[in-house]
Amino acid sequence: MRFKVLLTISCLMFAIGNVFSQSTPKFLIISLDGINPKAWEVAHTPNIDLLIQNATYTYSGLTLAPTYNSTTWSSLLTGVWPAKHKVEQPTFTQNDYATYPHFFDYIEAAGIKTASFVSNDSIATQIPSNISHNVSFDSDDEVVAEASDYIKSNQDVGAFFVQLDQVFHEAYGEGKGFDARRAEYIKAIQYYDEQVGTVISSLAARSSYQNENWMIVLTTNHGGTIDGKIGGKSLDEISPFIFISGDFVRNREFILDILDAEKGKDNAVFLRPGINEYVKIDKTGTKLENMNDFTVELRVKPKDASSDPSIIGDKDWNSGGNPGWVLARGGSSWQFNVADQNGNRKDIDLDASKWPIEDDLWHHLVLSFDKDGDAILYTDGLESGRTPLGYGDDASIRSPYDYLALGEDGTLAYANGSNQWKGVYDEVRIFDKVLDPATIAAWKDEKNIENRHPDWDHIIAYWKFDEHEGKKVVDSSGNGYDGELVGTKRVPANGSITHVDIATTLLSHLGVDIDSDWGLDGNIVDLVIPNIVLGTDVRMETKDVAIYPNPASDRLNFHFSETLKPGNEVTVSVFNLNGEKIQFESLTTGYSDISLDVSSHNKGYYLYHIQGKTFSYKGKFVIKN
């Protein structure tokens, strides 16, 4: 059965290339509730993987706390955050749906029919709407069967919502957990994949499918903790995956590289690999210069790395025996090193299988340092490793270098791995005391802690990186230990696709004019491939030209219903899914068939644009070898 579903989705994605911009826009949202973003690294999801090949996507989107089902469904389906829709409890009792209704109501008001199929009847009964066909069922299997049949047979419906919650019930509650290490959890996610395949395959079975332009959104309402809890604001709870797939959607992961910091917003610092980028703080004559008992906290979003580059530190990291301290990358995890003036070194090397951080998700890292006690590392609020220090009163870990640095060591010229990792920094805090584990866990997801943190009186330095321009990094502790950006850039701390972006993006796709009085909080996600926007000169009569074989191997052929007149120059451009032109040919006319050699291209998805004096056609094709 799975093999058949895969074939159908594959054919569906090939066919999408023949749907042009003047086709009728439609969309399908599938909410797979209860999936922790880290689970994608483990689960086998071939149907969903095929969608991603044709999508703009993120594994670490954003929804706002509290992460109750009621709250996150309301954000997703109204297009506004909890401050507006008012659903901030596990129930729907307090709400303002009168002001901020289900966004399907705007679609219905525009004369487009909508349909919703859900496993949790609260969505159908507690969120009022004018949806034409609004039904709930007792199981995911029933939802999938009924939604698939309805999608096939109702050509006049333009917007569909399908919600499944089997994974949520597998993860939520005592003795369970949103934990990628639980076999039952991963098995449930993999079953979701089969159900997704069934629903999406129903699109291609529609009699009007060839004249439709589909956008498919795959998301989850929220994640949860490894011990089965929801409602909080941990990164595992507020970071839903969001995949937006469709005709001429740019195939890219929506990551911070492409975004710019915004004035007055929550920003962060982004380091890029292979470039001389770091943050430096001159610690000369400050409390940072010779610390004994202290705690370092930071939020970091790491991606790939090589060797063991510094995360933050003040020592010469070319040798662990040099005086000073450093937190550094270590494989796909992280590590700690310190040494005194006599070269007495101490290390903590974390097990990457237990404490992985190289996943492009936010992590809270903490070093607790008690000079005559222990050094302890915490990852996302959990103790990850410790080592006894036992340095005497006469020992000093003071580095001879003037700078504390992020993304570099104290020399600002680390030779073994410098600038070899990609990551984002936010909320870097240093205290002149050892924080207790309960405080670390309770405050790991908090931002803007000024005068709120129980140990605020012990803060030494606090860099939030919220400035949107310039090189200065302001110390918010009040001590004036400002830093400087070197080469790096600021980005939005939550620079990703959000739940509320889905409504605005899909309304735009359908051509529904968004009224500012609606107060929607989302942005329209930039999905279109640059330079591939279809113009008004494009003819939509697919009967005029046939493209074959698709998928292709060595050659792509174009058959025209009428012979092309001699002298009518025909050009064919081929683009990859990043919008880059990779082939351009002028072809001989005077025939009804022309052929393009595509043997030099790798296996994958491509776009073509064939133009003459009186016609222009664009679409997608696939190379299978």
Image (tube, rainbow, N blue to C red):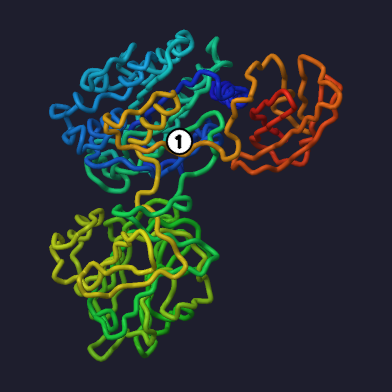
Q: Position of residue 126 (x, y in %)?
A: 21, 21
Q: Name the foreground residue: 93 vs 589.
A: 589
Quadrant assignment, res 94? top left
The residue shown at (35%, 53%) is 262
> Label 1 amino acid?
Phe
- Judged left or right of residue 109, residue 579 is right
Q: Residue furthest top?
A: 153
Residue 254 visible, this angle: yes
Q: Name the foreground residue: 281 vs 433.
A: 281
Q: Name the foreground residue: 259 vs 423.
A: 259
The residue shown at (23%, 34%) is 71
The residue shown at (25%, 24%) is 101
Quadrant assignment, res 31? top left
Where the C terminus falls, by quadrant?
top right
Compared to residue 90, the image places residue 368 above or below, namely below
Q: Position of residue 332 (x, y in %)?
A: 46, 59
Q: Callout 1: 10 Å neighbours few (<14), some, many (20+)?
A: many
Q: Name the foreground residue: 199 vs 247.
A: 247
Q: Position of residue 489 (x, y in %)?
A: 43, 61
Quadrant assignment, res 279? bottom left
Q: Which residue is tagged 1?
A: 243
Marks counted in the figure total 1
- Judged left or right of residue 152, residue 576 is right
Residue 182 visible, this angle: no
Where the N terminus falls, by quadrant?
top right
What secondary structure is found at the residue carrying circle 1? strand
